Image (cartoon, grey):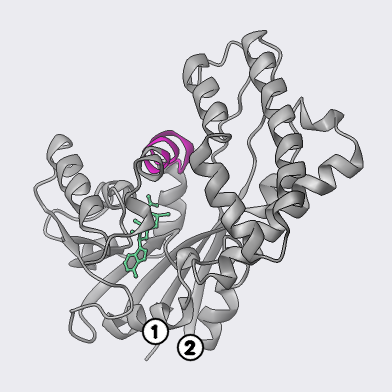
């Protein structure tokens, strides 16, 4: 299978960091899964499984006799997921390479399919969803976990709340143009969570539950939750040449000029340096709120 942008060292680091500590509370999964008779689930698929974190979370709820499969298009991520399963002593999970648009699985073969942040990285989420519905059994369950990432850009922290309106708008316009560029380049839509409901209804899926991820990871002194050094590194990484290049490519594809990008990046850099300074001085506060939706639906026919 072809190499993807997801196998870059920086992206793997990002997947590791954000998934291990930043996401779901297991208690909230209980709320979502209460709609399903889990004992009757004998086949589960996590598609676009990446390093396997959602697969591992779901495996804790599924019965021992349930066949659990994780599929990802990138073989390097599948190898890491296999290693992660070994480290966690999961022997009932199979990780396979496969493409969400054309899964080599028969029609009506899974009781339960989940995906987290995969459809939002695709040029054709509707086609991918059709493929998931094809291999889902009638009466089977589909769980989509997708974000609106722009929301994070309008939530203040102790540094951004002091910015002028013009600076806030400049940073927001950068994020919006980056999103536009990503869509144009066929690399997905980080706000796909807003559109998933419409796609599910138009695909004749019956909605059982819609929720927001309720887990926040607030940063406040002395930063025990993430660790001070780790938090500093996370903030510094946002300005790395790798992420700058990624952002610039999307920004320009979204219709922005290289000069505008550099001007807004300079504001972002100043803000980030201030955040670093306040973390070191124990005066940085950030609730880190964002929008991550979960849609649980069932196949009616
Ligand atoms: C943002 S990551 C999410 C990974 C994982 N679901 C998680 O939440 O940690 C997106 C994943 O989708 C996978 N992906 C992208 N295009 C795909 C395709 N056509 N078929 C299967 N997986 C794909 C990527 O390789 C990557 O692992």
Q: Is 16 within the magenta?
A: yes
Residue under the image location 65 percent in, 57 percent down: 251
Which secondary structure, mark 2? loop
Give the image quadrant in which the ligand numbered 1 is located.
bottom left
* Residue 291 x, y percent position in the rendering: 62, 52
Residue lying furthest right in this view? Answer: 165
Instruction: Report if residue 98 is visible in the image.
Output: yes
Residue under the image location 17 percent in, 67 percent down: 42
Asked whether 65 or 115 is in front, the reply is 115
Count of numbered labels shown in the rendering: 2
Q: Residue 34's image quarter?
A: bottom left
For the N terminus, the quadrant is bottom left
* Residue 209 x, y percent position in the rendering: 52, 66
Instruction: Report if residue 214 is visible in the image.
Output: no
10 Å neighbourhood of mark 1: few (<14), some, or many (≥20)?
some
Q: Height in image: 266 above or below 296?
A: above
Residue lying furthest front in this view? Answer: 259
Which secondary structure, mark 1? helix
Residue under the image location 21 percent in, 45 percent down: 80
Which disc, if any, is residue 210? none
Q: Mark 1 or mark 2, which is nearer to you?
A: 1
Residue under the image location 69 percent in, 15 percent down: 278
Mostly what secondary structure, the magenta segment? helix
- Residue denoted by label 1: 130
The magenta span reads 14-25
* Residue 130 x, y percent position in the rendering: 39, 84
Asked whether 28 or 180 is in front, the reply is 180
Residue lying furthest left in this view? Answer: 91
- Residue denoted by label 2: 204
Q: Height in image: 265 above or below 36?
A: above
What's the distance in space between the residues labelled 1 and 2, CA to CA? 10 Å
């Amino acid at each position: 299978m072809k190499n993807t942008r997801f196998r870059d060292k920086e992206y793997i680091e990002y997947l590791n960091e954000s998934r291990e500590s930043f996401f779901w509370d297991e208690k909230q999964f209980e709320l979502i899964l209460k709609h399903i008779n889990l004992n009757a689930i004998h086949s589960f698929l996590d598609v676009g499984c990446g390093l396997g974190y959602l697969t591992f979370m779901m495996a804790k709820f599924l019965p021992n006799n349930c066949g659990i499969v994780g599929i990802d298009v990138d073989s390097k991520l599948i190898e890491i997921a296999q290693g992660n399963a070994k480290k966690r002593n999961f022997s009932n999970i199979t990780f396979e390479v496969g493409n969400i648009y054309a899964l080599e699985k028969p029609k009506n073969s899974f009781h339960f399919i989940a995906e987290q942040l995969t459809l939002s990285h695709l040029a054709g989420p509707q086609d991918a969803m059709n493929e998931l519905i094809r291999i889902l059994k009638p009466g089977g369950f589909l769980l989509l976990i997708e974000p609106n990432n722009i929301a994070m850009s309008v939530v203040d922290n102790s540094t951004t709340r002091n910015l002028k309106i013009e600076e806030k708008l400049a940073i927001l316009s950068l994020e919006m143009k980056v999103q536009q560029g990503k869509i144009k380049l066929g690399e997905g839509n980080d706000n796909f969570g807003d559109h998933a409901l419409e796609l599910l209804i138009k695909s004749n899926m019956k909605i059982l539950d819609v929720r927001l991820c309720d887990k926040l990871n607030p940063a406040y002194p002395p930063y025990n939750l993430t660790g001070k050094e780790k938090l500093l590194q996370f903030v510094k990484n946002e300005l790395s040449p790798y992420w700058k290049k990624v952002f610039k490519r999307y920004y320009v594809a979204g219709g922005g000029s290289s000069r505008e990008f550099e001007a807004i990046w300079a504001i972002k850099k100043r803000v980030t340096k201030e955040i670093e300074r306040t973390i070191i001085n124990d005066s940085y506060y950030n609730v880190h709120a964002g929008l991550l939706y979960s849609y649980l639906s069932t196949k009616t026919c």
